[in-house]
Image (cartoon, grey):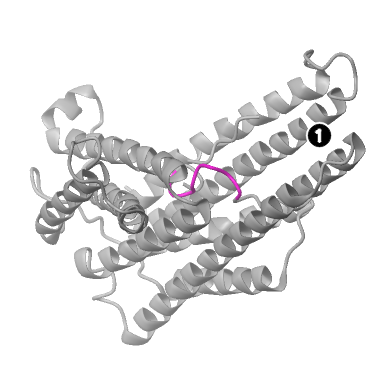
Amino acid sequence: MLSGSERWAIGIGLALSNCALSALGFTLQRKSHLLHQKDAANRSLTSDENEPGPAERSCQLMWVIGVILYISASVPDVVSYAMVPQVVCSTMSCFRLVLVTVLAHFFLNEQLQRREFLAMTSCVIGTFLCLAFGPKLPESERVAEAGDLYHPEVYSYLIVGIASLLFLLLLEHSDALGLPSLSNTAHYLILPITTGLAFGIEKVFNTEIGFLHLPADFAGLLKQPQWMAMAAAICALGLTDLYLNLRGAQKMPVQVFIPGAFAFATSLQFLQSVFVFGELKDMDTKDAVLAMIGACASLAGAIGLQTEHLKQSWTNQHEFALVPQASESSSEESDATLSKHQSPSAVTSPPLRFLESSSVEIP
């Protein structure tokens, strides 16, 4: 039986592993994409344009490794939410963007701007405050009674949350249902909120499952249908979140969808940690205030990083589109300039869960 401090250390380690794996996986995908562009430009100048060379095969291998690392990062993410308070895990997810930015600077040769540095500083300091003063785990293990939830507030919250999610999904798919279509403004508001809500409800199940006894074998699973139901809900909401991320990439500008969905999802998790799970109620007032200040600073820094990355990418793409293609050499130089300065967030798949979270680049 693990003590509270041991569970805390393991949970934080898993959260850091999730950040490292997802950031490294994303960087490898991005690197393979840039190398693929360079290789394609070189082959266009030769006669063997349709023959994949060693460089292209190397790009594909790098992309596969990046995808595997990114998908594998979801395992420590799920386990960490079951072991560590939700406000701490959500703050750690903001810190992931700092790692992505640092790796992009050193391995993708992307330059850091002053605003990005300030956003990274805010995110790092906020994460430190939340870890230092945030809620800790009690030494005694907290386990729900058989057939019950540890936090009674979860029942009413899930009823309202799931009903709201279904209603928003119906609104978002009103065209397919033969209902009057919504305006673009309405879609731009509904889709990020729906995505963030699906992610937030998933983390409610993810946190609450940590208060249930883990079945020892398959027979134990059959005797605890509640654990199986929660695990199924986590998978179903995870797939819903992935679908909404992909839909957002198709229906909305990326620079609008990504920060909006991420901000709503993380803010919702902060509210859930306070009002649903009561993670701050037994804390000293000073520690609780410092923890929430840290969480908000980390969120503000993460949003600042995403917004700055996407703004730079959007500007680079439009400037590139306006460059006249006078010759093959000038076109190649423009491609190289675009690849050098393009941001790691400039992908069609947003980062909530699979970024992040949901960003798999295909060379």
Q: Residue 10: image x %, image y %?
A: 45, 51
Q: Which quadrant of the figure has residue 212?
A: top left
- Residue under pointer 1: 38
Q: Is there any visible trace of residue 89 in the rendered image? A: no
Characterize the local packing of mark 1: few (<14), some (14-19) or many (20 or more) Cα atoms within 10 angstroms: some
Quarter of the rendering occupied by the C terminus: top right
Tell me if residue 305 comes above or below residue 292 in the rendering. above
Q: Count the numbered circles shown.
A: 1
Q: Which quadrant of the figure has residue 289?
A: bottom left
Asked if residue 177 lies in the magenta stretch, the reply is: no
Q: Is residue 15 left or right of residue 269?
A: right
Q: Is residue 77 left or right of residue 306?
A: left
Q: Residue 155: image x %, image y %?
A: 10, 54
What type of secondary structure mainly makes up the magenta span?
Answer: loop
Q: Residue 177: image x %, image y %?
A: 19, 36
Secondary element under disc 1, as helix, strand or loop, is helix
The amino acid pointed to by label 1 is Lys
Residue lying farthest to the bottom in this orientation: 286
* Residue at (18, 23) in percent of width and height: 219
* Residue at (20, 46) in percent of width and height: 180
Asked if residue 347 lies in the magenta stretch, the reply is: yes
Q: Residue 197: image x %, image y %?
A: 28, 54
Front residue of 343 and 220: 343
* Residue at (25, 41) in percent of width and height: 173
Q: Is there any visible trace of residue 119 in the rendered image? A: yes
* Residue range highlighted in magenta: 346-353
Tell me if residue 282 comes above or below residue 65 in the rendering. below
